[in-house]
Image: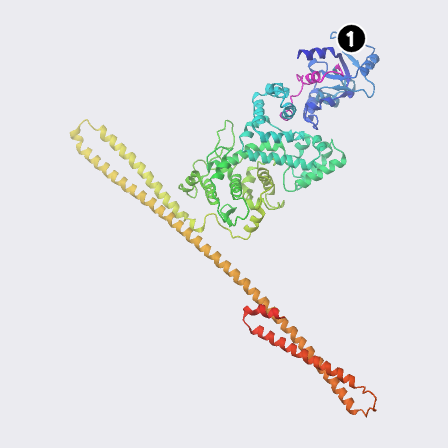
Amino acid sequence: MERLRDEQTQKFLGTASIRLEVLDFSLTHDTRLPGSEPDWDNVESLGGLFLNGISFAPHQISHQIPALIDQTQFNEALNNANVSSERLKRNDVEIVELNFTAGSRVHCLRGQDRVLAAMRVAEDKNRRWVIRLYQQDLSLEAIKDLKDERSSEKEPSDAELLYWTTRFWLEHEDSLDDHQNTWLAHLARKSKSKAEGLQRLWKNHGTYKKLIERFEETPALFGGAQLGNISRWISAPDQMNINQMRRVLDFWRDICDSNKSIKSRLSTRMLEEVGGKTPGSCKKHHDDIRDMANKILRNFENNERQDILNRLEYATRDRLVPTFSIFIKNIGYLKEVVGCLRHLVSGTLQNIRKNLDEAFSKRNPCMLQVADNRCKWVEAGEINQKELAYRQLWLFALREHPSISKQIERKKAAPKYFIDESKLYQFALLAQKLGYRTPQITAIVNQPRMIVLSTGEKSSSKTPGDSSNYSDGKPLSKDQEEHKHSLFLENIHKPFNPECPGSRFFFSQRSLYLDVFGDKFRGIEDFLNAAALCDEQSLGDEAMQVDKCQEATTRKDIQELSDMKTKLEEEVQQLRKSVTSEGEDAQSMRSQFWEMANKVKEKEESLEDINKSIEAKKKEEAELFEKIDKQIEKLNRVRSRLQEDEQREQDGAGRLRTQEEKERDLESRVKSLKEEERDLESRAKSLKEEIDTLVCIQNCSSFVPIGEPDPLQNTEKCNTETILQLQNDKEELEKKMNALKEGIDAPVGSGAAVSTAF
């Protein structure tokens, strides 16, 4: 450190007041995310302070900006001002104003926000700032040390600290220790817990580390990072986090067309403006983003800008724009949803999926829930049954988490959740039907259940996030209550319809589901196509629908008997205490004692009768459920026989259609042969008439001179041959007709032989 101070002193040229237009901040880009713009909110805030005469102190040492200057340009400015370089180094004289020639640049090492604010509000004569000038050949270490002087600068954001710390680890992981990472050291000074969390994430979670390395290719993706949430991030299910991070990476890779140059020029402002938006399906989002395109994509040429917007709109036809910031915001919400599964199986959020998979048993056909109390039983085919079952449980938790979320102790005021036992019973019943078997599920399903049975206050209708603008997955409470019934698997995997009611709510929750589980689910399309042909059933078969009035009455009787038992026990206890306390005059109180003893005996006998009644009621209930189980088995056997009958009926219908087609083919052939027969008969009749005419001519002819050839001889011979040929054709045709008639009269099984004859 002392060596750097010596170098800075040696290369120091002096302090001067310089016009703002000459100042260049290209060397400050490595102090913020590449491709990002200045913090315009901070610039605007500083501008407001400057207008009110607050903090505008260019001469104040803590506000002075270090900068590098070319020696030639510096000497030229000194000559123009007619001052020596030594005067610029003195602290006891007025600061000199230096004016540089056109094209000269003073390369500042920090302070851009203050200069931009001053350029907006300062009058022309005051458009100057005090700069500490250094030679241009200052070493990189000394330059970095000057940049890190942040006494009057805005603190780097968590996103910037995460990016630059990551860059350091990637460049020096094998050669330098953590204490040499100046960015990590700066974070530790700012927040020790954040620094420790970041170290733990980087060193103990290899999968996350590899994903963060990919984030480094697109620095703007670090925007919105909140290092204080790392512990919550690490405690959430790994696969859920990994899928969402991959979604962010893959989405922006496609938007950038896998172009490294485009990736490096994306700005955090771009991601802030488009994150959670849907320009491909929402006209307002489309128009707003198009209107601000020149601002959020100022690092790109017009043709690049247009290509990026086109790809962005295409990619958001049915999904929200994902960002790292949205992923971080959703961690708490998703942990609450996944936490509902802890009602069904023991374990932490990290291993709850593994424990559920181990408790799962395949069944075929498997169940598809299509409504709160409706389902379909569908042949599994090639689909992963564990994945199918888990996703349906997860969607139930997404719909009903306000009613079944595990209550969390909160120090601050926040929406409180109380378990709705009826919803919890539905949750456990669904898990059981899907094929899960755990002690927790069995206990919930077998506990006494009534139409309304609650262990606390009524479930709150509110969910966290009432101020949500749907930029992330957290829904509005009124939309959750009104449209949660759309969140079933067959709706999620259908093409999105933006015109359907509650589409805004459904759109965000569908996007969240696909981000959590990924886009690919092998076999789901065939499975849902098969489900479309299946009939809906009650989630519990009709035989399982116990008469609610009877059930409520039975449980009410048990409750009344239990209350009476408690009351009698209290009375017995009080009587015993009274008997014990009565001892002063045993002779006079003996009769009263025996009377009380008799009452106690009567009460005990009554209590015994009540216990017997309770046992009888319980036995009655057990018999009722046993009867239900038998009815279920009977229904299953009937369903199996119906399926077999339906299959035999389909096979018979197929054979009947084949025979009808053969008969139609034979009828067509008969018709064709009859037409051929009529044609031959017509030809024979015509030839016979010609022969008769020729014979008549021959008979009427006079003689033929001796030695002359007979002109009719050849004609007669030709006609005779034709007649013979026609007779042969007719005989052949008659044979075919006879064979065809025999084929028609023959049994159905010989149809193939007749067909072969032709």
Q: Quadrant of residue 263?
A: top right
The answer to whether residue 680 shows anywhere in this view is yes
Indicate the secondary structure of the residue bearing disc 1: helix
Q: Residue furthest left?
A: 587
Q: Quadrant of residue 224?
A: top right
* Crowd band around label 1 with a 10 angstrom C-alpha radius: few (<14), some (14–19), many (20+): few
Image coordinates for residue 16, horizontal then vertical, percent? 76, 13
**Foreground pick, 331 / 743:** 743
Which quadrant: the N terminus?
top right
In the image, residue 737 sits, relative to residue 635, either above or below, namely below
In the image, residue 415 sits, relative to residue 371, either above or below, namely above
In the image, residue 195 sits, relative to residue 531, either above or below, namely above
The answer to whether residue 471 shows anywhere in this view is no
Q: Determine if the magenta segment contains residue 155.
A: yes
Image coordinates for residue 583, horizontal then vertical, percent? 20, 27
Q: Quadrant of residue 86?
A: top right
Q: What span is in magenta?
A: 133-160
Q: Determine if the magenta segment contains residue 374.
A: no
**Foreground pick, 587 / 20:** 20
Tell me if 138 is positioned left or right of 397 in this view: right
Tell me if 544 is positioned left or right of 467 in this view: left
Tell me if 528 is positioned left or right of 141 in this view: left
Mark 1 lies on residue:
86
